[in-house]
Image (cartoon, helix red, strand yellow):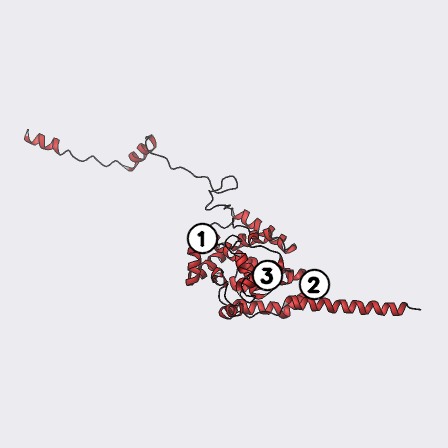
Amino acid sequence: MQGLRTVLRHPSPPSIPSAATSLSHLHESHHVPRPQQTASFSVLNRPPPKYEGHVPLTGVERFALALGSGIGSLINPYRADLIAACGEATATPYFIYRLRRAMLSSPTGRRILRDRPRITSQSLDLPHLRTLGPNTVGGNYVAWLDREGVSPDTRASVKYIDDEECAYVMQRYRESHDFYHALTGLPIVREGEVAIKAFEFANTLLPMTGFACLAVATMKPSERKRFWEVYGPWALRNGLRSEEVINVYWEEEMATDCGELRKRLGIERPPDMRETRKKEREERKKRKDAAKAMEDVAAAP
């Protein structure tokens, strides 16, 4: 009896079933959950957005967006929506991450990523900026906005970049664009935009900025000549040697002298494009008037 109680108290371990038996029980059991198959990412089955306004794209959609918006923006470089879409579609997978690494490698860039400031008419005190000196960053910036008739609110929100932090990096680059105009004095004309885009390409390596330089083919012969001889070399030289302009905390530089900031960043101011274009128009008008006067003399009895 004592031995029987011992056996009952310590039953022998169950035998290990064979592989065939285990598979048979696995298929027959109704309690073993089957792995759920998730549908692949497609046009009809998109993953949820990762941030407000985010639109996930398939690889085919991203390629089509890059191609279509790139061609459209080349035909009409004033289509900001196409330029923005092309910039987002071509920034991944490498280039926007490189730009984020550039920010993470800079103390100021890390602060910008942490604070995530936005450049809008609400975040900037434009009336106060108008009281700053004409040579300050803020005074120059708001004077440039007034002269060109533009607003900080014209920059579209990023939506085609999947990584949320990289989306902010692209947004910051986009909203800083007008400060590059103010810092260099280049106007919003096709010639000025191409020069700025060439500078941005050398500094940021974003593909869209390089594609935008192809618009030089649509410029007038005199403008193309100036680009190849003056503004193109200036853009590449300064974009490559200067600091990463994405790391400028513009909100903290409003009272800084523009010349001082250019010196700190390693950027030389290009020749005044407005003045150059004005002189060209005046010379063209003089030649036209002289030709007309010659025609009048020849037609006189």
Cα–Cα gap, marks 3 and 1: 30 Å
Which is more toward the observer, 200 or 74?
200
Give the crowd class for mark 2: few <14, some 14-19, many >=20 residues within 10 Å: few
Residue 200 shows in this picture? no
Q: Secondary structure at mark 3?
A: helix
Please state which amino acid type lies under the numbered disc 1.
Glu
Disc with the residue nearer the chain's start (3 vs 1): 3
Can you name the residue that lies furthest to the top here? 1
Disc 1 target residue: 165
Q: Which residue is mark 3?
A: 144
User: Which amino acid type corresponds to the residue marked 2 in the rendered image?
Assistant: Lys
How many marks the image carries: the answer is: 3
Q: Secondary structure at mark 1?
A: helix
Give how far across and how far down residue 277 sits, in percent. Answer: 68, 66
* Residue 61 place in picture, x, y as percent: 55, 47
Quarter of the picture containing the N terminus is: top left
Q: What residue sits 81% from the left and 70% below the top? A: 290
Looking at the image, which residue is at 34% across and 32% down?
A: 27
Tell me, for residue 220, which label it has, or none: 2
Dividing the picture into quarters, in which one does residue 100 lie?
A: bottom left
Closer mark to the observer between disc 3 and disc 1: 3
Q: Is residue 276 left or right of residue 19?
A: right
Instruction: Determine whether 71 is above or below 287 in the image.
Output: above
Circle 2: element type: loop
Q: Is residue 89 above or below residue 102?
A: above
In the drawing, does residue 293 fall left or right of residue 119?
right
Three-letter code, disc 3: Trp
